[in-house]
Amino acid sequence: MEELPDRAVDAAVLAGSVGDHDLSMFGLFLQADIIVKLVMLMLVVSSVWCWVVIFEKRATLAKLTRRAKKFEDAFWSGEPLDKLYQRIKKSPHDPLLKTFSAGMEEWQNTVQSGIPAREELQASLRQRVERAMAVTINREMNRLERGMTFLATVGSTAPFIGLFGTVWGIINSFKAIAATNNTSLAVVAPGMAEALFATALGLVAAIPAVVAYNGYSNRLSRYAGRLDAFVTEFTAILSRHLESQDSKSPRKVA
């Protein structure tokens, strides 16, 4: 009959021992091993930087979409392209405006002395215009894709970094068991909590990074397709103008 009070006392002592450990997030960080602390800091910094990239990309793509719609409305409004080019040269540039400007600059540099009459020269002019616009698109898309590699890297590696912290925390728990020759919860709980906290931080960093990378990759691909479609439309206008040869500046064909 005396075993029951003894067990109750042991349980109370065990509960008090576990309660001595601060199991809050900040407490788990302070009590963690130096290796686990470094893992946690790395994951927290990665997560914060991921959110910086996410918000920056969201604002940038929203702004590009608005500017692209505004420019396309002006492009198809019937305004002569040379006048449109002169008007936007002084405006803040975005990839679509830079692509248009590159094509117009190549065109105007070539036709200053007159539109070539030979078909071979006209084909060469179209190729140069397309090449100038394609180079601009590649350069601008490379700029827009900055930060995407970081999102992909965090999304793929953060869970494994967190897993490393988990394994290290479990090793510390086993060391504590061996040192105290005690398998009670008071000995095992702190190390296991640290281990699970590292795993949680890895998931917190990885999940938003993966979701954002997939979403923004899709939006960037659509925007690149929009630029390529614009190049096709622009060169079609130039081709029709070369065939008509009725002026020295390309005019928009209705």
Image: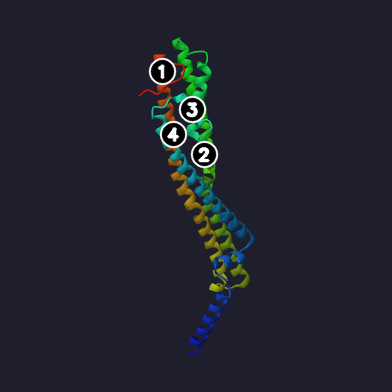
How far across and how far down the image is residue 55, in percent? 50, 49
Look at the image and tell me whether residue 172 can be seen: yes
Q: Which of 242 and 227 is in front in this view?
A: 242
**C-alpha distance separating marks 1 and 2:** 33 Å
**C-alpha distance separating marks 1 and 3:** 17 Å
Report the side of 238 relative to 40 (left or right): left
How far across and how far down the image is residue 99, in percent? 49, 29
Q: For the view shown, which residue lies furthest in the top direction?
A: 118
User: Neighbour class for label 3 at 10 Å: few (<14), some, many (≥20)?
Assistant: some
Secondary structure beneath label 4: helix
**C-alpha distance separating marks 3 and 2:** 23 Å
Color scheme of the displayed model: rainbow
Indicate which disc residue 85 carries.
3
Q: How many marks?
A: 4
User: Neighbour class for label 1 at 10 Å: few (<14), some, many (≥20)?
Assistant: some
Indicate which disc residue 241 carries.
1
Tell me the residue at 39%/27% (across/down).
78
Q: Using the image, determine if residue 16 lies above or below residue 244.
A: below
> Which badge, 4 or 3, comes first in the chain's sequence?
4
Indicate which disc residue 144 carries.
2
Identified by mark 4, the residue type is Phe
Q: Nearer the viewer, residue 119 or 51?
A: 119
Tell me the residue at 45%/38% (across/down).
67
Which residue is tagged 4? 71
Which quadrant would residue 69 be assigned to in this image? top left
CB of mark 1 within 8 Å of CB of mark 2? no
Tell me the residue at 62%/72% (across/down).
180
Tell me the residue at 53%/82% (across/down).
12
Q: Using the image, determine if residue 141 lies above or below residue 42.
A: above
